[in-house]
Amino acid sequence: METKQSTEQFKGQARLPEFAIPKRYDLYLKTDLSECTFSGTVQVNLNIVEDTKFLVLNALELVIHQVWYTTSSHNQTYLPCDVALDGDDEILVLVFDEVLGVGEGVLGIEFSAALNEHLKGFYRCTYVDGGVKKNMGVTQFEAVEARRCFPCWDEPALKATFKIKLDVPAELTALSNMPITDEKPNGNIKTVYFEESPIMSTYLVAFVVGVFDHIEETTADGIKVRVYCPVGKSDKGKFALDVAVKALDLYTKYFATPYPLPKLDMVAVPEFSGGAMENYGLITYRENELLYDDLLSTAARKQRNAIVVSHEVAHQWFGNLVTMEWWTHLWLNEGFATWVSYLAVDSMFPEWKIWTQFLELTTDGLCMDALEQSHPIEVKVHHARSIIEVFDDISYKKGSAVIRMLQGFLGDHMFQKSLSSYIRRYAGKNTTTEDLWSILSEESGVQVNSMMDAWTKQKGYPVISVKSKDDILEFEQLQFLSSGSHDDRLWIVPVTLSIGSYSRRKTFLWDTKFRELDISELVHSSDENSSSIKEKNRETCDEHLWVKVNTDQSGFYRVKYEDKLAAQLRKAVESNCLSAIDKFGVLDDMYALCEACKESLSSLLSLMDVYRKELDFVVVSKLIDVCYEVVKISGDAIPDLVNELKQFFINLLLFSSEKSGWESTSGESHLSALLRGRVFLALATFGDDKTHKEATRRFQTLLNDRNTPLLSADTRKATYVAVILNTNTTNRNGFDSLLNVYREANTVQEKELVLRHIASCPDPTIVLEALNFMLSDEVRHQDIIYVLAGISSEGREVAWRWLKENWELIFNKYGAGILIHHFITDIVTLFCSNEMADEIEEFFASRVHLSFGMNLKRSIEQVRIKARWVENIKREQSLQDLLKRLARKKS
């Protein structure tokens, strides 16, 4: 009883006690893939920093067989009198009769466990070899899953070196963070020895055991880079290999710090919970995030692959070499890796204009941070297991956008100089946000922390209201929330604005609620030297003297213009006076204000109407996104006008579709291919007859010849959507044909495309069949997210009933991980009524779990936001006449 009481002191603690600090792990694992088990021994070199009878470390779902502690000074061995595993707190408490004195020693633990199938810790996944399904072993330790594999001090600040040895089947490949030093065969087993690693956190330890082909290159600094692919598909890794080699060279120069390891391996894993994981020297990816097929991968997928690879390689510096001290500062990893990945891709592929597409990422962050259930970038994480709740769009999308804003304010050169100083100073160490701000302040002379605290330590962002009176602009800042409410928080806002021309520009910092700006000098200044606006547009632009606040969308905030300024800005868009980035921003802000009931749907539709002649990919892409959202909300708000609305949106896109055409042209740009895919997918979604007929013809050709050149990777989505939208229970040929395409596909790219659309059918019965198929053995756990993301509005009620009926099965089968978030979010957020929000709250009241509580609250808040928007739209009087007029108007 006394021992039990003494161990109780360690329960419910956010962090491990600081009795001992690990310095080195010697880890030996024996894997049995046929029985799906593993066993091992870990010997940890410790520095005991205060006299103690306890050693407390992390362990979860492990069986502990033997424990000992040996001092380095006297070689004296101590055996614990009690070994207590606490599953709730995920700790292993070792109790000793004698005091362990201050000094160095080695803790040894023998243990065993099962290879789980939940895609976390050391888990098993399957691959097919000669038609036979076989097992392989993979690790995924971020954030707190290393403890499922071996007992350890599983906190990012407790860095150590790792010496790893694995017993694996002789015919398999074993990989870890470091290069192999030796392999010793022993019958059908071999022992693989790896070099000792540099100092790193436990969540970055990794190993993979499986069958692969690989390709390799060497960087200018002699770093060997390899891509491990499924057998027979090594050619699909060539693009990722090329990107990784270039990214390593680029980051080495940008951070003025060499890559710290002798090799970098990248592995395509058949089952993986996330997109990729930046394990030190051994990056793991789900297959479609690493493999690129020249024929079957879309332009969007190629771009995505480049960004993901660049992001994970960036982590080797931001996250691995320099690591956040605790999960509170996770955004230092994710925000910077995201931002710098765009910098790298822009350097490699300048023709992609990737920084304009960074706007889409910023918008996602703005949407998430406009919820009352948002959280600060620098969120307080009290329990490591709750990290999954903040590992979201705020940490890496808002985080990267705020970094981009700061970069713009300080200037590129100063920002790069500061970051390289930060990396060099803290290499091998752990940092907080304040450490970064301190170096940026030292280098720039600007008090960065006082400017940035409001952006990282408090949630949300402002909407800036702009009015004009003579030559005075009047500004007011309020917190922007999609719910329509606000509070009195203030931000230090770096404001940029242009007046009638990009040569007439003003930049200032603003930290008060109200501000007036005299623009008389800008209004009356000469524009003769401007090269930003075409000569033929200059007179038109000056005549209306538009005002654009947040020029180049450099700031993380919304802008609301009074009616007069909004009308002038609309004319500037129509006259092509604005850059693509600012056209995007004007539309994005208007949509957000409309959703928050700060602007009418009529105003939004009138603005959309002036984008008819637009051809820039990022602008058309934003236009399409807004179209999708308005159609969804209109099904509940104005169901009698949905057809007119869809016809209006079809008309908006006719110009860009005619310019794109179904067929690619020789030498066309990457952005042209992106545009074609998005435009025809939208036309198919809105039910354009001409698109459906052509899509059906091309699909039939595909069924007869899987290699037909008539259906490119970029237009397949449009084809599949047209097919599924014309499917129902009495004519289910399209659904069955898509399932056959899925079953016969031998690439992950093709399988993903089919899964994304099989639940998009307007017939609820087909949707239900798709959901049940999703849970079958034919669909990998990791791929369930694609089906969930495609559920049609018409199928939402049956999807909700299905989720309730199957909840216990789903939760027990897939565990409390990222996948559960998708089951909740993708189904719950299809609804637009307070009644449904109440029903959802009631259902989950007794089922809420630490891992998804915040996610559930956000989803319900989004339902209530849409319910409010529905009621606001219903009250608009002139909407019907406007829509009928817009639907009849041709491009």
Image (spheres, grey):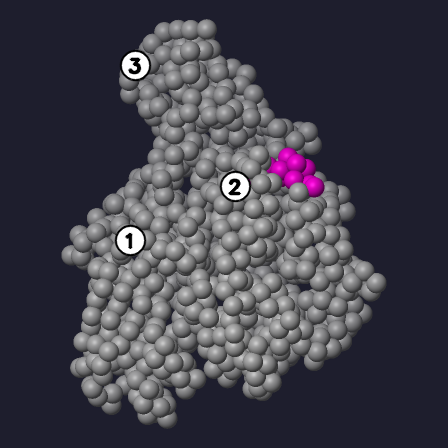
Q: Label 1 vs label 2: CA separation?
A: 28 Å
* Residue 890 quadrant: bottom right
Determine whether the residue tagged by mark 2 lies in a helix, strand or loop.
loop
Q: Disc 1, disc 2: CB below 8 Å?
A: no
N-term mark: 1 or 2: 1
Q: Is residue 845 above or below residue 566?
A: above
Q: Which residue is mark 2?
A: 852
Q: Which residues are magenta?
A: 805-818
Q: Which residue is mark 1?
A: 489
Q: Label 2 vs label 3: CA separation?
A: 40 Å
Mark 1 or 2: the one toward you: 1
Q: Label 3 vs label 1: CA separation?
A: 48 Å
Q: Which of these two is toward me, 277 or 189?
A: 277
Q: Which residue is mark 3?
A: 51
In the picture provided, is 763 more to the left or to the right than 67? right
Q: Position of residue 656 (x, y in %)?
A: 56, 81
